[in-house]
Image (cartoon, rainbow, N blue to C red):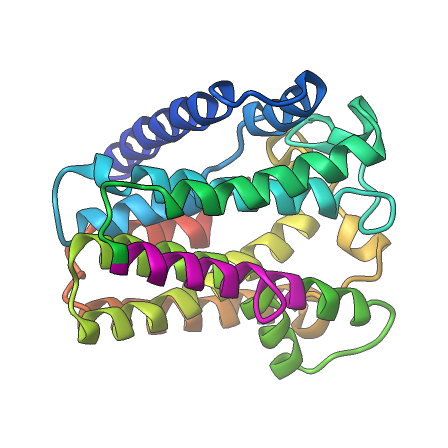
Amino acid sequence: MLTDLSVYIDRNKELVQKELINQLDQLTIPEVLKESMLYSVEAGGKRLRPILLLASYEAYADKLEKALPTAVALEMIHTYSLIHDDLPAMDNDDFRRGKPTNHKVFNEATAILAGDALLTYSFEIVGTDTGLSDEQRIRLVRMLAQVSGPTGMVGGQLLDMEAEDRAVSLEELERIHTLKTGELLRFAVFAGAYIAGANEKQLVALEKFAYYLGLIFQVQDDILDVTGDQEKLGKPVGSDEENQKSTYPKLLGLEGAQNRKDYYVIEAKKALQLAGAEGSTLMELTDYFSNRDY
């Protein structure tokens, strides 16, 4: 089953990557801006968010191409957030995905603008997707703005910065990562199923699933920052400790972080059962998120 999942992930990564490049190549924009945008997009990455969106869609419908534009838009927002996170004013990282960060290759101003361009273009992609109904476009654009803006990822990023150099409670830590990481994952799970025609009861259960999946993702990220392989991660190990970040291992210890992650996995799978998606790829992806080593 793991081999099948690896094939599934690789196939959809290639599908998403091809569409990302196509979307940017067609733009008539300043050449340096396009190069900067393409640099970070072509760096690759796990593509877990768009893959999760496509898997959520496939749990309820066929014809995967219908969900592809929204999946690509979501990955553009994720890529923008990484470009900005790496800036000297934020995490001040020199490497991302094993390559020099955007601002190291171009400059800070260009990197900021490339991130801005990816963010705003993502809304244009969803808002002009003729494969969606007017109602779907409006709901998805509104939700995408919510999960990526001040009530979502951006708000979570600020809370994460404010939590540096001080002890936080488990409740605070969960809130930080629910916003910073979990909200984009929630959109991925919701959007895929919504485009596929899942009913409101299923969507509610899937949002609960996504909540726990976001926490699973972050706990494993924190664990890998302590125990991971720098070559596989594509970034320095121990950067969280160096930057005085609040993490699960720091709060609970490595064993406690693992136990907390196991609890999240159980709750996520319960929610999937309520959504009638227990036999879908989403179940396998839950274990994949929990056990990934990069």
Q: Is residue 150 magenta?
A: yes
Across the whole image, how many numbered discs are drawn on residues?
A: 0
State left or right for residue 67 relative to residue 183: left
Nearer-the-camera pick, 264 or 51? 51
The residue that appears at 66% across and 43% down in the rendered structure is 116
Placement of the N terminus among the 4 image quadrants: top left
State left or right for residue 201 relative to residue 148: left
Q: Position of residue 102 (x, y in %)?
A: 74, 30
Q: Position of residue 73 (x, y in %)?
A: 44, 42
Q: Main secondary structure of the magenta part?
A: helix
Q: Is residue 106 magenta?
A: no
**In the figure, residue 172 lies in which quadrant?**
bottom right
Nearer-the-camera pick, 183 or 144? 144
The residue that appears at 58% across and 74% down in the rendered structure is 174
Is 32 above or below relative to 212?
Answer: above
Q: In this picture, which residue range is highlighted in magenta?
A: 135-156
The residue that appears at 47% across and 20% down in the rendered structure is 26
In this orientation, does residue 172 appear? yes
Is 39 above or below relative to 170?
Answer: above
Nearer-the-camera pick, 140 or 246? 140
**In the figure, residue 8 lies in which quadrant?**
top left
The residue that appears at 56% across and 45% down in the rendered structure is 120
Nearer-the-camera pick, 28 or 148? 28
Placement of the C terminus among the 4 image quadrants: top right
